Amino acid sequence: MPVGREGRNVVANPEELNRWLQRTSGEAAGVHVATAGADLLKDLRASLAAQKSAQQPRKKGEQIAAAKPSKRKASRKS
């Protein structure tokens, strides 16, 4: 990770950090550091579209497996 220390602070160059993220993330969609001027809603929509297109289509009538309820013992009060 391209970071350095300046006294008590850890600093990074945004361009170097973006290049490192793109290289190490393995994501097809563009991965980048969120900045003050970034359009996060646009990035979220693009990420959701990429995930949706990567999912395999389900067969008709096939349902997503529901999570099993956790088995917890009831606590006893004395």
Image: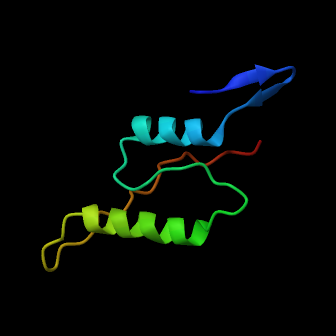
Q: Residue at x 66, y 46 (%)?
A: 75
Q: Position of residue 57 (x, y in %)?
A: 18, 70
Vertical arrangement, residue 40 with respect to residue 78, above or below: below
Vertical arrangement, residue 8 with respect to residue 34, above or below: above
How many labels, in total? 0
| Foreground pick, 54 / 43 | 43
Give the left or right position of residue 5, taking residue 33 as reference: right
Q: Position of residue 46 (x, y in %)?
A: 44, 68
Give the left or right position of residue 33, taking residue 11 as reference: left
Q: Quadrant of residue 24?
A: top left
Q: Residue furthest left?
A: 59
Give the left or right position of residue 17, taking residue 21 as reference: right
Quadrant where the N terminus sits is top right
User: Coloured how?
Assistant: rainbow
Q: Residue furthest right?
A: 7
Quadrant where the C terminus sits is top right
Q: Position of residue 36 (x, y in %)?
A: 73, 59
Vertical arrangement, residue 28 with respect to residue 12, above or below: below
Q: Quadrant of residue 52?
A: bottom left
Q: Residue at x 35, y 62 (%)?
A: 51
Give the left or right position of residue 37, taking residue 21 as reference: right
Q: Residue at x 26, y 61 (%)?
A: 54
Q: Quadrant of residue 48?
A: bottom left
Q: Residue at x 27, y 67 (%)?
A: 53
Q: Residue furthest bottom?
A: 60
